[in-house]
């Protein structure tokens, strides 16, 4: 049974805001990335998982228990880091940590002390005068201090400097090795790419893609950009294009082509290019950001995706079109 389940979750705030028929699971020991820009629906989904909001349709489950109905019970196994932090300004950091440990009935503070040291938290001062970065560190410590089995993290590195972001990513990797189940909501590609096993992309309240992270990192297809010295060479290459290679896009005015080549055919492709006069020949590294932008940048297209992922993208585009049509009243009610 999945640790976290989101089933047909819908919460419509009107004017296209909310989440609509969202479905995904997070398995035990998995780091699941929830990727999208601000306002896409990430926080709304998380608030339902935490039991803070009641869905209009569908449900969210934590260890098989309904988040809304079993709110008090599921909190015991959850560590939650909100995207926006609101702390009581009349307390010091030390007092806030003490208050949270009392609420969780904690007696052993060794793990908390380790977190304070690891994240270089200066907790003795008043919360009112703490910097945003220090408040974020305090929120991290109090989210993890009871060593929960499940972590729900909403924009966890917001407000942290680059060095501390790196420390946080290393910490998430170590928590994963300990068997923790983690939902990581973010719009920062580097932290999602560095930590997640699977990734879901949300756009305008709808999931437009869910995929295994390694499918991007270890695609069977390589992509190369080639520029020829003349139009004659460029056209000769296109005319003689052998089997096993696929031209993704061309720029005739620059005598350039983007070519997708299966791993098994790379050596043969290089031998073919040896018979042509080139300006340059380079591999294009395909990244999570590239894949993400195919959903958000209208100037890009599936033609630029490595083979296999272009099919996935087309399927996701079809699904997004169907849900958008339904949202606009063309195929059913909201």
Image: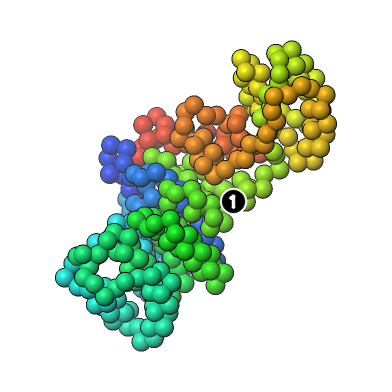
The answer to whether 52 is drawn above or below residue 334 in the figure is: below
* In the image, residue 255 above or below residue 219: above
Between 124 and 67, the one lying in front of the other is 124
Q: Which residue is mark 1?
A: 212
Residue 27's image quarter?
Answer: bottom right
Q: Quadrant of the C terminus?
A: top left
Q: Nearer the viewer, residue 329 or 99?
A: 99
* Residue 103 is at least partly visible in this image: no
| Residue depicted at x 25% and y 64% | 130
- Seen from the viewer's position, the closer of residues 217 and 166 is 166
**Picture coordinates of residue 119, whole percent (x, y):** 40, 69
**Is residue 44 toward the left or the right of residue 295 in the image?**
left
Q: Secondary structure at mark 1?
A: strand
Res 249 seen here = yes
* Camera-side residue of 95 and 40: 95
Q: Residues within 10 Å of mark 1 (few under 14, many from 20)?
A: few
Residue at image point 53% right, 58% down = 195
């Amino acid at each position: 049974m999945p640790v976290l389940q989101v089933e047909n979750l819908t919460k419509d705030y009107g004017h296209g805001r909310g989440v609509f028929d969202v479905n995904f699971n997070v398995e035990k020991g998995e780091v699941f990335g929830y990727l999208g820009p601000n306002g896409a629906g990430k926080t709304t989904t998380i608030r339902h998982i935490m039991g803070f909001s009641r869905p209009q349709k569908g449900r969210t489950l934590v260890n098989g228990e309904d988040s809304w109905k079993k709110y008090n019970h599921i909190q015991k196994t959850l560590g939650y880091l909100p995207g926006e932090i609101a702390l009581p300004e009349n307390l010091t950091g030390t007092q806030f940590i003490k208050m949270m440990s009392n609420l969780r009935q904690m007696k052993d503070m060794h793990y908390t002390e380790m977190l304070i040291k690891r994240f270089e938290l200066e907790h003795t001062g008043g919360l009112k005068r703490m910097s945003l970065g220090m408040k974020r560190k305090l929120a991290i410590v109090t989210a993890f201090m009871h060593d929960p089995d499940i972590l729900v993290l909403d924009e966890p590195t917001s407000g942290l400097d680059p060095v501390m972001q790196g420390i946080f990513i290393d910490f998430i990797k170590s928590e994963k090795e300990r068997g923790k189940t983690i939902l990581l909501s973010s719009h920062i590609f580097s932290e999602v790419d560095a930590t997640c096993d699977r990734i879901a992309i949300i756009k305008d309240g709808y999931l437009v893609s869910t995929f295994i992270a390694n499918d991007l990192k270890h695609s069977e297809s390589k992509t190369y950009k080639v520029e020829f010295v003349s139009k004659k060479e460029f056209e000769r290459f296109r005319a003689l294009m052998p089997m096993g290679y696929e031209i993704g896009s061309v720029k005739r005015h620059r005598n350039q082509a983007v070519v997708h080549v299966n791993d098994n055919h790379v050596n043969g492709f290089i031998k073919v290019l040896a018979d042509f006069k080139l300006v340059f020949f380079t591999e294009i590294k395909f990244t999570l950001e590239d894949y993400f932008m195919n959903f958000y940048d209208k100037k890009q297209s599936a033609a630029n995706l490595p083979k296999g992922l272009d099919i996935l993208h087309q399927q996701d585009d079809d699904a997004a079109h169907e849900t958008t049509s339904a949202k606009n009243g063309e195929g059913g009610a909201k």
